[in-house]
Image (tube, rainbow, N blue to C red):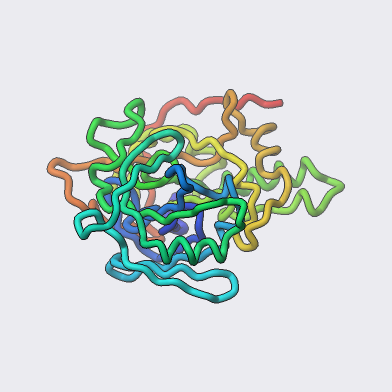
Amino acid sequence: MPHLASLHLYPVKSMYRLSPSSADVQPWGLVGDRRWMLVDASGTALTQRDEPSIGRLRPTPSADGTSLTLTAPDGSAHTLPAPTVLAGAPETTVSVFGTHFSAAESAKDTSAWLAEHLPAKLGEVRLVHLDRPATSRPIDPEYAGPDETVSMADGYPLLLTTTASLEELNARIAADHPDDERRGRALPMERFRPNLVVAGTAPWAEDGWRRIRVGGLEFRVAKPCGRCVVTTTDQETGERRGPEPLRALGRHHRFGQKLVFGQNLVPVRPTPTPDVLGTLTVGDAVEVLEEGPAPQPDRR
């Protein structure tokens, strides 16, 4: 029986994860997920694509979300209030993959702390907060309605992966490197930075899902998730670890130019839409409500 095996959220985009046993769901994602983001001097998002060691910084939001503590690998910590434009914080324009939206900027002492704990090559680094997620950033209209928004995630409110697909991918990686134990080593799910991890399915079953129910909440499956260099980064050490899993995805699970692992989800909103749609809990049943033809990967 398919069920929710684990939950993950990332308070600051590209920083370390939290893995709670339950999480509330808002129309734009899990409560507290990617509501903060690092940006450069121009307002462009800074992620592990730019600097893998960003993932070593550990964010801990307060229970009420009004403050955030960042902890560096050396144990030093910095706590700051969550800035809001309504309370007088500077409003700044930021961007993720060319999509521009507004956010509230943190105080300069946070930038100074980040400068001490991130490589100097990044230049000026600022921390911003998405204080108005209901209206700030629309989802790509090709895959969403006009009022549907997303946090500071790459493009969609939630990302789902399955344990069966990871097991199959790891088997492919091992088979591709029969004489190299290091390169053929199994990869953990953390490399893919999902929100929902589902167990109890066939490998790649999620490729054919169109609508699902998890616990009491429904989600549309918007589109497959194309993967990037972040998946080659050890999430514990902040170091790149070679070509896998991108090499294996390119050989065994490539659709056109996309190396696919996981599916992007959009919560189905009732009318009227509350700020919190419901709660997901590890162990919740997962029911496939609608399926479509699963595309066949282009194999090399």
Towards the viewer: 204 or 129: 129
Q: What residue sits 41% from the left and 59% below the top?
A: 11
Q: Position of residue 181 (x, y in %)?
A: 81, 53
Question: In screen coordinates, is 294 left or right of 82?
Answer: right
Q: Position of residue 30 (x, y in %)?
A: 34, 54
Q: Is residue 15 visible?
A: yes
Q: Is residue 198 visible?
A: no
The vertical placement of 99 against 6, above or below, is above
The vertical placement of 282 against 102, above or below, is below
In which quadrant is the C terminus drawn?
A: top right
Towards the viewer: 298 or 41: 41
Count every numbered label the image shows and give the total.
Answer: 0
Residue placed furthest toward the left? 272
Towards the viewer: 31 or 255: 31
Q: What residue sits 64% from the left and 36% below the top?
A: 249
Q: Position of residue 143 (x, y in %)?
A: 35, 29
Question: In screen coordinates, is 23 left or right of 183?
Answer: left
Quarter of image, res 129: bottom left
Q: What residue sits 56% from the left and 58% below the top?
A: 55
Q: Position of residue 149 (x, y in %)?
A: 29, 40
Question: In screen coordinates, is 23 left or right of 293?
Answer: left
Quarter of image, res 288: top left
Quarter of image, res 212: top left
Question: In screen coordinates, is 245 left or right of 202?
Answer: right
Residue placed furthest toward the right? 179
Towards the viewer: 25 or 124: 124
